[in-house]
Amino acid sequence: MALPVRTSMKRLLGSIQRCTATKSLCTEGKDTENKVSCGGRVFSGIQPTGVPHLGNYLGALESWVGLQGGFSSVLYSIVDLHAITVPQDPALLRENILDMAASLLACGISPAHSIIFQQSQVSEHAELSWILGCLTSMPRLRHLPQWKMKSKDKKEGSVGLFTYPVLQAADILLYRSTHVPVGEDQVQHLELAQDVARIFNNQYGELFPIPQALLSASRRVKSLRDPASKMSKSDPQRLATVRLTDSPDDIVLKFRKAVTDFTSEVTFDPERRPGVSNLVAIHAAVSGLTAEEAVRSARGMDTAQYKLLVADAVVHKVAPIRIRAGVIWRAF
């Protein structure tokens, strides 16, 4: 019989806390003990969509790891209430919550330096969302990207989808967070949280700090099969998405089959050569290079050879995560 999510989460986190006592598990390459705290509280959330892919890691999770030890407190939430703004299979959602918890820990989010929790287990998220929703106008929500992108004809969709940004604001303000790591596509949602905090403070007295954005480097990893689209776990093409737990052979195959063009030289030109430029961007991100340095390292190679170079760099980058994930699940 499957364990209830609350029990499973406790067992999983308990197992990982024991595992993270070993030096190599979650602090590899991170001098967290010597970081100087700048004060403040960081909050961020991630939807439980199962094992993250390479785009999730490079776009958010890698920076999450880096924030640990740099602030007085750091909170990361698996935001399952956000997940149900679209239809969900309850059994799969429970599985995905556990997969995401294990993946965060495998990526280097350490219970010794961060608080990791499941959003729906803290009922105050929904309670504060109602209060903040009463301070937010409908025209304000209609202009936010979440509604524009996910509602059909900008008129249809659930009430939950429409008020999604208010719940995001509640997530942030509930903990009186001072800093929120965001990509450029989420800045407008953070601005709503800032506005609602000001409105509440003006009406009821100073309670909420105005949260500030921690803008992450723009690392938008594209699909390996359609470089016009973002890498996505829901992509029906198996070869389009690199998951963090993919085997080295799978990663090499996916990059070998990556869509490029008919020019063999490696250049970085996102407008005219999106497929090759996506490979360059990935190579730069996983290797700590600039795009120009990545292109220089490919001098004398054709795109077929370069695909293997990039695949090898990705395999090297995600190997510790895949190994730690295996240790975590065996401990669980």
Image: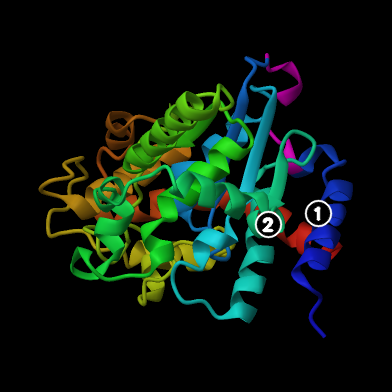
Tell me the quadrant of the picture where the N terminus can be found.
Answer: bottom right
Is label 2 in contact with label 1 (beta carbons under 8 Å)? yes
Tell me the quadrant of the picture where the C terminus can be found.
Answer: bottom right
Residue 72 visible = yes
Residue type for callout 1:
Leu
- Residue 42's spot in the image, x, y percent? 59, 31
* Alpha carbon distance from label 2 to label 1: 8 Å
- Residue 75's spot in the image, x, y percent? 66, 38
Residue type for callout 2:
Ala
For mark 2, what is the residue?
101
Pointer 1 local density, CA inside 10 Å: few below 14, some 14–19, many at least 20: many
- Residue 200's spot in the image, x, y percent? 48, 32
Region of the chain picked out in magenta, as a range: 26-36
Q: Residue at x 66, y 33 (%)?
A: 74
Q: Secondary structure at mark 2?
A: helix
Pointer 2 local density, CA inside 10 Å: few below 14, some 14–19, many at least 20: many
Q: Secondary structure at mark 1?
A: helix
Q: In this figure, what is the number of numbered marks?
A: 2
Left or right, residue 25 beside residue 84: right
For mark 1, what is the residue?
13
Task: Verify whether residue 320 appears in magenta.
Answer: no
Left or right, residue 278 beside residue 14: left
Q: Residue at x 77, y 41 (%)?
A: 111
Extreme-bottom residue of the structure = 1
The foreground one among 140 and 203 is 203
The foreground one among 257 and 199 is 199
Characterize the magenta stretch by its predominant secondary structure. loop
Q: Residue at x 58, y 46 (%)?
A: 128
The foreground one among 282 and 34 is 34
Residue 312 visible = no
Left or right, residue 24 beside residue 126: right
Does 111 appear above or below 311? above
